[in-house]
Amino acid sequence: QRKLGLTTDKRMALLKGLVKQLLEHEALETTETRAKEVRVIFEKMITTARANTLHSRRETRKLLNDETLVKRLHDVVAPRYLNRPGGYTRMVRVGMRRGDAAPIVKLELVAE
């Protein structure tokens, strides 16, 4: 796992925030390394949510900590990917960040 130059609690708070943004807006622009970490968490979360059981809702609630997002994930987003074995997100390179030339990517949900 990448550490992103942060302590564990700060890193997890950052990644949870990015996962929530991705779920809410279905797209997100961030650095490539952050996007790769978010992608891992998000793909596992959708795979869990596809089952749509009480257990899967509780598992995703642990990460999201927001009931409206859990409902959105289980009722809107996850059903789109029932017949897809994985690869729910796409990363597109956008350019470089002006300050430090970090590669910026757009992480978006694959439309199905």
Image (tube, rainbow, N blue to C red):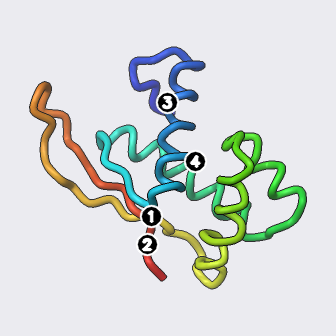
Q: CA distance from mark 4 to mark 3?
A: 12 Å
Name which of mark 4 and mark 3 comes first in the sequence: 3
Q: Position of residue 51 (x, y in %)?
A: 79, 70
Q: Position of residue 110 (x, y in %)?
A: 43, 72
Q: CA distance from mark 2 to mark 1?
A: 5 Å
The dot on residue 41 is 4
Q: CA distance from mark 3 to mark 2?
A: 23 Å
Do the CB atoms of the residues marked 2 and 1 lie less than 8 Å apart? yes
- Residue 4: % across, % down: 40, 25
Q: CA distance from mark 3 to mark 1?
A: 19 Å
Label 3 belongs to which residue?
14
Type of amino acid under label 2? Val
Left or right: residue 107 versus residue 52 is: left
Instruction: Give me the C-alpha separation between circle 4 and circle 1.
Output: 11 Å
Sequence-earlier tag: 4 or 2: 4
Quadrant location of residue 84? bottom right
- As helix, strand or loop, the secondary structure at mark 4 comes to helix
